[in-house]
Amino acid sequence: MAEDVFKKIVSHCKEYGFVFPSSDIYDGLGAVYDYGQNGVELKNNIKQYWWQAMVLLHDNIVGLDSAVFMHPTIWKASGHVDAFNDPLIDNRDSKKRYRADVLIEDQMAKYDEKIQKEVTKARKRFGENFDEEMFRQTNPRLLDNARKRDELHARFKAALEANDLDEIKQIILDEGIVCPISGTRNWTDVRQFNLMFKTEVGSTAEGASTIYLRPETAQGIFVNYLNVQKTGRMKVPFGIAQIGKAFRNEIVARQFIFRMREFEQMEMQYFVRPGTELQWFQSWKEQRMAWHQALGFGAENYRFHDHDKLAHYANAATDIEFQMPFGFKEVEGIHSRTDFDLSQHEKFSGKSIKYFDPETNESYTPYVIETSIGVDRMFLSVMCHAYQEEQLEGGDTRVVLRLPAALAPTKLAILPLVRKDGLPEKAKEILNDLKFHFNCKYEEKDTIGKRYRRQDAVGTPYCITVDHDTLTDNSVTLRDRDTMEQQRVPISELRALLEDKVSITSLLKKLA
Ligand code: GAP
């Protein structure tokens, strides 16, 4: 059922100009996608919401735009050349390749689903008298699944921490995990696979040297932190925010834009005094969760998930997960990266990049809290939440994208009732005034009903209809996408009425 909904979302994205497979006329390229005319607007709005929440709302956070190509030693220093690996496993029958850790995580999610099913069934059976807590503590089937899940979790965590690839394979075998394609357990051994893309810089074979496409934007911030600190006269604590492309040769390209080989990140590194990092980690967890929840998708659709195995650079790490049609999935990571990266760059470059603190008269290497969110995953979570099929009165149905107005590609559709009698001219006059303030679309083809449906399907929060009365009373009919209610509004009041509702500022105000 949830899979069907997800398939519909993917085809809706293509049909309505949000996301196309890359190189579509050549049958696509695995895990690479292009954003169409509506997708690019939604994506830009997400980026703007993030950028403004970071850079406008914090007077100690500034931006950066560093290059994709960087000195290759950076990736040696950061640990990516040696340790940026995923454990992969192949099924000999289907010849399909999987991430071994994801197979086990999916298995844990299956136990969670079973538990949830028991609870839902019991709630239906007992109605208002249902005591969920008591049920969870006493139902034998539920307790059995919870025990299996916890045991699996403990075993998996230990295997990850020990980097024990044989044990990871053994877990897959013991759990009876089968390949979804062949249905068999004919697995190879688990191997590590480095995710960085390599290329060469320089035109002659002798002069060429290997460089990498960056797998995260963060390193561009680390190697520039002192440039920014000195030229911006920043004082610890301060942050540097960056939005940019990242590249990973993902083993398994699944779930549409959830896991891509070329994607975009929005990362912020917050430089703090050593010893204060866990306090800032907590503060950024709260701030980032508030940013997500200001979109109004419901607190129950988010959760924190602490990492089972900390990355080589972290002393605390958590993910913000969002309820997608295929389960709770990571959208953002918040990591306490200690002084690992800066110390490594100091060591590998041979240059001192210490910060002099004028308040304590000391030089030290700052500790770093990082918030790192994928633009594409954020896009997917917004789409998954917004997509709805609705049954209307009179047996009609509609597909509506209930996008937060501030993120919607088009804010206002301007529709002349008919293509004559001076109505198109009047509608264009309104367009030519409002287009300076927010994204408007003019549409005159087809019946009003069909035009409303088209705008619903791309998430336009408001439509106005210009009719014959408009020519005399200078008012239009304003239709609300969600309630479908209509009201008569003077043209002169449209801008003030809509601007506050559709602007990014309306979201930012919830955070201030
Ligand atoms: N600098 C830290 C870092 O890169 P990460 O957890 O590997 O941490 C951060 O990535 C975020 O980037 C993830 O939470 C996810 O939203 C996004 N991301 C990572 N890999 C991705 C991929 N292959 N496709 C799309 N988004 C991805």
Image (cartoon, rainbow, N blue to C red):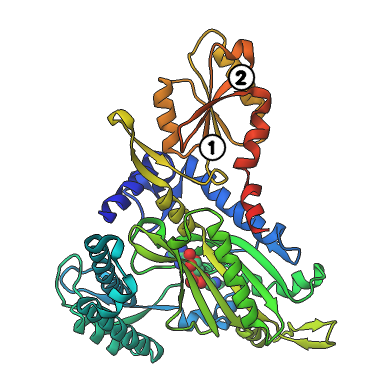
Q: Residue at x 27, y 60 (%)?
A: 127
Residue 36 appears left or right of 341: left
Q: Give the CA separation, mark 1 to mark 2.
A: 21 Å
Residue 261, labelled with which disc? Answer: none
Q: Residue at x 33, y 61 (%)?
A: 326
Residue 404 appears left or right of 287: left
Q: Residue at x 76, y 77 (%)?
A: 236
Q: Measured from the top left, where is residue 361 in percent x and y? A: 85, 87
Question: Amino acid under label 2?
Answer: Ser
Question: Amino acid under label 1?
Answer: Thr
Question: Quarter of the image containing the N terminus?
Answer: bottom left
Seen in the picture, residue 451 relative to 145 is either above or below; the reply is above
Q: Residue at x 58, y 54 (%)?
A: 47
Q: Nearer the viewer, residue 197 or 323?
A: 323
Residue at the disc numbered 2: 475
Residue 410, labelled with which disc? Answer: 1
Seen in the picture, residue 511 relative to 161 is either above or below; the reply is above
Q: Measured from the top left, where is residue 340 in percent x and y? A: 60, 85
